[in-house]
């Protein structure tokens, strides 16, 4: 039961949505899958006076490839990612990540774009989209714009998107790669990440390394990426970057985990993840979806 | 020397037809078709009102004022309720609670006021408008601090509280009950022992997490009859406590009716009375209108009973040949703000804290400490899971120290029939040795397993368990049984179908005696106006106790059936028997009479008159050999427990050395059911109980902040297992050493299956990594960090 | 607001507030009581329904979002007798208290419709969002595997 009442609108075009957003002076929330939003409404964590449901807007559900650019609409659910042939063929890492999100009943509704709009530190899409250098495309009263994912997460549950904008889609520039998403959970079932590592390995020893749930936002580690660049992976190199982890992250101790364990496990996941991403690039790694911890 | 039982149940030697078979549950279709109705599913029409509760944000505070004026004016509000409306106490074993807080609040979440409104939303919104002024006091959150001489008193009036005679509260302290056992001479035994191990183990609080939250609908009708529909394990106990607590309003037992349909899981959490009394009391203020009070999941965590935490100081002495000579067990229970039920958990643990071992010298001190945390209470295992963690960890450590195999050590000391118990009575027949051997076999005890994965190691563990029902000495059960025209049966009892399969087991017992197939027997959930008395569905006692009441009713019905046949045909009663729903005669093989021919309409005699009439019967059972009168200083002299159920658990697990993650590859659990009335349902208890027990050690625990507020009152952060978080393989083993006074030899198994889960993991983790963890839970994090510390020296 | 939805094959026109959650509307206005209130924040799965054939947490859906969608509850799949899966749940005593059963029946139904030959891991994954406190899941997993169309065909040959 949601105690606070609010107004509800369901625009059928992007133009209508942006118009409603622009005209509304009070607090407003955009509703896609609702698996975070409705829970927060129920918990009284938010109390908007207007909820705009964007699910009736067409053209936000595509998963398609245009040249070397992958386009994922903002209404694409985690289940759709898992079931998509395009994802399987070109970006199986997205499916590997999506499979760790909650459970089917949530994945059938929750969207990947919504996940990074909620922008909790543990959002599963965060580290992977960071590692892919994703672009986030928005539309608002002043037109369309895109934000580099590296500039997207601005603080705890804060993003570069403004209250009067709607995310329309995400794009990822594709090239040959291997990737991995390793997620630390308290058990094998449904859980939020206590720490997570997203890695993309490109040819010529080029890596993207991102972490989740170990800072107020998902983060990239330029230092680790730089250290790895151009060098063949070996035990010493891996040990060297694992040793950098404590300086690269700022985990907290909370009910879910201690900072010490988060730090320790981020190192363990980085080590196992780097090898798996490298091997997947080479076509020898564990199948996507295999759990490394 | 065993107890002589006044009632010897039906012979267990005869060939049994229904008992011992995996009959299909009689509630299966209801539950799988969506037809099963739980309290929240019942319709009460447009007059239904909704209640919301204002809760204390402080763990300990004096209430200075409550301003309800804004709330009273709010939209939809019908009535606002505070402690002034109900200055009445209640309690199961000790009256230490109020329906709504009076001058003090003693835990975060304690009910301070209530709103009754036309809609749930209006009730919740209005609750936010109530302003309560508090003088915040320093909370006591630790049971050992509560024990200190200079501790603040949580209940300054403890000395005046009414309680059962087997509790020993210490006035002007925080000790609500102190169960002592003194047997033999422990001091001398420790001095003479070859080896003594002393250590402390800690266990946090746990939540039951039935998936159905507590919910109650109450209605005082215009004739002043109070009916309460409730999700409860204890309809008659609830009626009794409602009638007692509300007696100042003029209620007597006959005016109070409790109706309990299907219950969506209990595990002890829905025993006794908790939030239901608020609903019942509030309804008395809005005559003619039903009032629904449903707990949110959060409230389910912080304002129902919780499993109590404990600090266990344990000292055990042994001889070099492995004989245990002395046990000293001092248990500081974090019993919470109100102990009206929880103090009996403390009592039960104190009586049995030696575990299933033969121990000549015993000093047990089980201390029920008031703290400013939510009320403790019954939880599957009833104190035994808590003390077994330390005890069974300790047994492994002692075996290692004296160079003995831990299974041999346990086998050597395992309690057997006739051994003297801590309080002086003697052990009932038990299959403990058989259970140990079968579990050891199932997990290939003695064979080391190697992992193929360089990141992981394997470990094995074993632990024993025992438990007796914890009940008042005169807790009783009753049943009504009636035949229908077609020879089918309706049985009413007041035990609760919590999921364990109680209704099906009662049907099987009646079926065995009367030969009516289970499919032709309906067993109804309770309505205290119509169903006969049952104390409560707790303590794993209903298969035994209610089962005996049903068996006696069935035997009485059979006697009446034979009487009718005797009257009409002259056969002697002892020549008659039942087979396939017919009466047959040993002396006349040609005679047979279908039950459906006469169990309602009777039998026509040759002269045209009729004999017989509807066959109805009653049965009751109360254990008549128990008593709770013992010396408060030694615990000797009484016979508080009816019998113990015993068993053993073993696991094989694999651990990731870096992450600490555990995979339970194999788990075996043997329990002595006496007689498995329905092996499928016993297996259900083994698998379900073991998984619930494993969760307490691997995943779950309640966390409280410095102010006593629960930090994880959601399934997001209180991690009960999902379908992924279970052992790869579970081997259920049913041992059957009959209980002489049990129905067909049966005794209860419901709680026992989770009791040894925690120590068995602790022992297997030690076996795998050499790390001994002495505090629960043993999470992957704790394992990883402990192992890191060990590796770094 | 007016809301038009199809529940178990029957068209309903209801009046709801935007803040009304679909679970509450199904239970209170439509009278389908098999979706249960367990946690109201998407953790337990006892409110599971099928929305256009896919399992959904009805506690995390605003009623107004369901406009024009087809909703199926356990009542809906039980009108014409039990499914193979339901029969197996009953005959193997797979459940205990039954409170989670409607959600699990639907989650497993969705799985078997999309995957006729699931592995144990697939079944665990499909059910991982539906909490059961009684059974330890094992009998449920075994019954779902036994009910899989591929297994059923195998048995009948």
Image: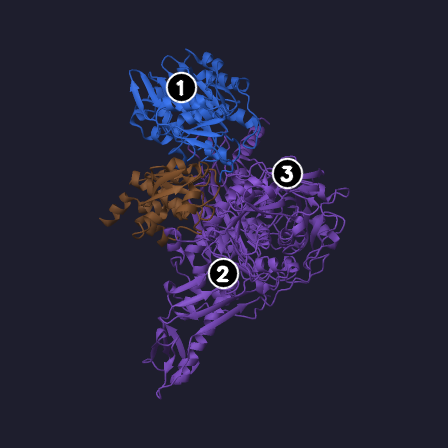
Local crowd at mark 1 within 10 Å, few (<14), some, or many (≥20)?
Answer: some
Q: In this view, does B553 lie to the left or right of C74?
A: right
Q: In this view, does A206 lie to the left or right of B422?
A: left
x, y percent for residue B84: 67, 49
What is the quadrant of residue A170 in the picture?
top left
Report helix, strand or loop for mark 3: loop
**Chosen colour scheme:** by chain
Q: Chain C is drawn in which colour?
A: brown
Q: In this view, does B528 lie above or below C39?
A: below
- The quadrant of the picture occupied by the N terminus of chain B is bottom right
Q: Name the residue under label 2.
A: B526
Q: Rounded to the nearest whole Å, what is the CA distance between mark 2 and mark 1?
A: 60 Å
Chain (purple):
B
Local crowd at mark 3 within 10 Å, few (<14), some, or many (≥20)?
Answer: some
Q: Mark 3 points at which residue?
A: B57
Q: Does label 3 lie on the same chain as label 2?
A: yes
Q: Is residue B225 above or below residue C104?
A: below
Q: Does label 1 lie on the same chain as label 3?
A: no
The residue lying furthest to the bottom in this view is B607
Report the front residue among B652 and B369. B369
Q: Name the residue under label 1.
A: A138
Residue B391 seen anywhere in this rendered image of the structure: no
Chain to which mark 1 belongs: A
Report the front residue among B356 and B54. B54
x, y percent for residue A95: 36, 28
Q: Rounded to the nearest whole Å, what is the CA distance between mark 3 and mark 1?
A: 42 Å
Report the front residue among B330 and B521. B521
């Amino acid at each position: 039961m949601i105690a606070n009442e609010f107004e509800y609108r369901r625009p059928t075009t992007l133009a209508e949505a942006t118009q409603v957003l622009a005209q509304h002076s009070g607090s407003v929330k955009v509703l896609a899958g609702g698996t975070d939003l409705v829970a927060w409404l129920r918990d009284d964590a938010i109390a908007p006076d207007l909820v705009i449901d964007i699910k009736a807007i067409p053209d936000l559900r595509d998963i398609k490839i245009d040249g070397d650019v992958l386009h994922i609409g903002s209404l694409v659910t985690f289940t759709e990612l898992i079931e998509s042939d395009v994802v399987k063929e070109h970006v199986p890492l997205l499916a590997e990540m999506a499979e760790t999100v909650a459970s089917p009943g949530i994945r059938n509704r929750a969207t990947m774009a919504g996940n990074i709009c909620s922008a909790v530190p543990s959002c599963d899409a965060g580290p992977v989209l960071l590692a892919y250098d994703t672009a986030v495309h928005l539309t608002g009263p002043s037109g369309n714009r895109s934000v580099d994912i590296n500039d997207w997460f601005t603080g705890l549950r804060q993003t570069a998107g403004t209250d009067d904008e709607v995310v329309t889609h995400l794009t990822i520039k594709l090239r040959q790669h291997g990737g991995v998403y390793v997620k630390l959970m308290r058990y094998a079932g449904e859980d939020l990440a206590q720490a997570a590592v997203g890695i993309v390995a490109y040819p010529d020893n080029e890596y993207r390394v991102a972490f989740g749930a170990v800072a107020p936002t998902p983060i990239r580690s330029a230092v680790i990426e730089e250290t790895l660049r151009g060098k063949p992976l070996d035990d010493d190199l891996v040990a060297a970057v694992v040793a950098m982890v404590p300086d690269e992250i700022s985990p907290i101790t909370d009910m879910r985990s201690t900072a010490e364990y988060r730090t320790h496990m981020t190192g363990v996941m980085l080590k196992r993840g780097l090898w798996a991403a490298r091997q997947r690039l080479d076509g020898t790694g564990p199948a996507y979806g295999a759990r490394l911890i | 020397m065993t107890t002589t039982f006044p009632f010897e149940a039906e012979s267990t030697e005869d060939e049994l037809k229904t008992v011992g078979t995996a009959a299909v549950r009689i509630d299966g279709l209801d539950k799988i078709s969506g037809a099963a109705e739980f309290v929240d599913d019942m319709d009460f029409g447009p007059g239904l009102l909704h209640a919301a509760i204002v809760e204390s944000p402080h763990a300990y505070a004096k209430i200075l004022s409550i301003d309800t004026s804004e709330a009273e004016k709010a939209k939809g509000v019908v009535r606002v309720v505070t402690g002034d409306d109900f200055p009445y106490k209640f309690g199961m074993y000790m009256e230490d609670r109020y329906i709504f807080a009076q001058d003090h609040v003693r835990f975060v979440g304690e009910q301070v006021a209530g709103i009754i409104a036309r809609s749930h939303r209006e009730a919740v919104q209005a609750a936010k408008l109530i302003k309560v002024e508090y003088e915040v006091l320093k909370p006591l959150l630790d049971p050992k601090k509560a024990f200190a001489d200079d501790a603040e008193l949580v209940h300054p009036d403890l000395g005046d509280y009414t309680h059962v005679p087997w509790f020993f509260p210490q006035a002007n302290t925080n000790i609500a009950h102190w169960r002592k056992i003194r047997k033999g001479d422990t001091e001398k035994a420790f001095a003479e022992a070859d080896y003594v191990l002393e250590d402390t183990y800690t266990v946090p609080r746990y939540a039951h997490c039935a998936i159905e939250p507590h919910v109650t609908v109450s209605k005082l009708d215009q004739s002043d009859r109070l009916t309460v529909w409730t999700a409860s394990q204890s309809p008659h106990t609830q009626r009794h406590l409602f009638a007692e607590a509300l007696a100042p309003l003029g209620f007597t037992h006959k005016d109070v009716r409790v109706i309990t349909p299907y219950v969506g899981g209990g595990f002890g959490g829905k025993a006794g009375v908790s939030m239901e009394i608020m609903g019942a009391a509030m309804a008395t203020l809005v005559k003619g209108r039903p009032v629904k009070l449903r707990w949110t999941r959060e409230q389910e965590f912080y304002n129902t009973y919780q499993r109590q935490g404990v600090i266990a100081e344990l000292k055990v002495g042994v001889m070099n040949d492995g004989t245990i000579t002395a046990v000293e067990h001092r248990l500081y229970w974090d019993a919470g703000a109100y102990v009206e039920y929880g103090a009996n958990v403390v009592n039960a643990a104190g009586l049995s804290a030696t575990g299933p071992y033969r121990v000549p010298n015993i000093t047990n001190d089980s201390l029920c400490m008031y703290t400013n945390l939510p009320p403790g209470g019954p939880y599957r295992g009833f104190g035994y899971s808590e003390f077994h963690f330390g005890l069974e960890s300790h047994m492994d450590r002692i075996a290692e120290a004296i160079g003995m195999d831990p299974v041999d050590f346990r086998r050597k000391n395992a309690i057997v029939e006739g051994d003297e118990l801590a309080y002086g009575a003697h052990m009932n027949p038990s299959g403990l040795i058989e259970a140990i051997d079968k579990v050891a076999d199932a997990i290939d005890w003695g064979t080391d397993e190697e992992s193929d994965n360089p990141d992981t190691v394997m470990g094995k563990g074993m632990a024993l368990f025992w438990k007796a029902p914890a009940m008042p000495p005169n807790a009783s059960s009753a049943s009504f049984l009636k035949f229908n025209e077609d020879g089918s049966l309706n049985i009413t009892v007041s035990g609760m179908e919590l999921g364990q399969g109680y209704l099906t087991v009662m049907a099987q017992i009646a079926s065995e005696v009367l030969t009516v197939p289970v499919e032709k027997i309906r067993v109804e959930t309770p309505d205290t106006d119509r169903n006969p008395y049952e104390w409560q569905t707790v303590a794993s006692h209903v298969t035994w106790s209610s089962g005996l009441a049903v068996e006696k009713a069935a035997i009485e019905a059979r006697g009446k059936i034979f009487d009718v046949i005797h009257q009409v045909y002259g056969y002697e009663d002892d020549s008659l028997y039942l087979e396939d729903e017919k009466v047959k005669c040993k002396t006349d093989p040609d005679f047979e009479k279908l039950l459906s021919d006469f169990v309602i309409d009777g039998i026509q005699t040759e002269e045209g008159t009729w004999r017989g009439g509807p066959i109805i019967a009653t049965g009751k059972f109360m254990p008549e050999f128990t008593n709770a009168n013992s010396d408060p200083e030694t615990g000797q002299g009484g016979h508080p427990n009816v019998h113990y159920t015993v068993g053993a658990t073993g696991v094989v697990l694999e651990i990731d050395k870096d992450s600490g993650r555990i995979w339970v590859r194999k788990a075996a659990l043997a329990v002595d059911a006496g007689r498995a009335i329905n092996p499928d349902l016993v297996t259900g208890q083994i698998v379900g109980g073991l998984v619930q027990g494993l969760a307490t050690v691997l995943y779950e625990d309640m966390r409280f902040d410095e102010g006593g507020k629960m930090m994880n009152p959601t399934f997001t952060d209180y991690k009960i297992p999902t379908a992924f978080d279970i052992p790869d393989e579970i081997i259920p083993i049913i041992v059957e050493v009959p209980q002489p006074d049990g129905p067909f030899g049966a005794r209860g198994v419901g709680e026992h299956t989770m009791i040894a889960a925690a120590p068995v993991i602790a022992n297997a983790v030690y076996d795998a990594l050499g790390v001994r963890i002495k505090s629960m839970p043993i999470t992957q994090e704790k394992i990883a960090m402990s192992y890191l510390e060990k590796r770094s020296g | 607001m007016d809301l038009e939805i199809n529940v178990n094959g029957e068209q309903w026109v209801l009046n709801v507030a935007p803040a009304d959650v679909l679970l509450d509307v199904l239970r209170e206005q439509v009278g389908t009581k098999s979706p249960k209130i367990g946690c109201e924040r998407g953790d337990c799965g006892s409110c599971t329904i099928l929305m256009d054939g896919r399992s959904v947490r009805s506690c995390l859906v605003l009623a107004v979002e369901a406009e024009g969608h087809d909703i199926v509850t356990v009542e809906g799949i039980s009108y014409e007798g039990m499914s193979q899966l339901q029969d197996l749940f009953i005959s193997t005593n797979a459940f205990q208290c039954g409170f989670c059963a409607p959600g699990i029946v639907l989650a497993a139904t969705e799985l078997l419709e999309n995957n006729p030959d699931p592995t144990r891991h697939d079944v665990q994954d499909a059910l991982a969002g539906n909490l059961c406190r009684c059974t330890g899941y094992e009998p449920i997993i075994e019954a779902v595997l036994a009910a899989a169309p591929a297994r059923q065909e195998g048995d009948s040959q």
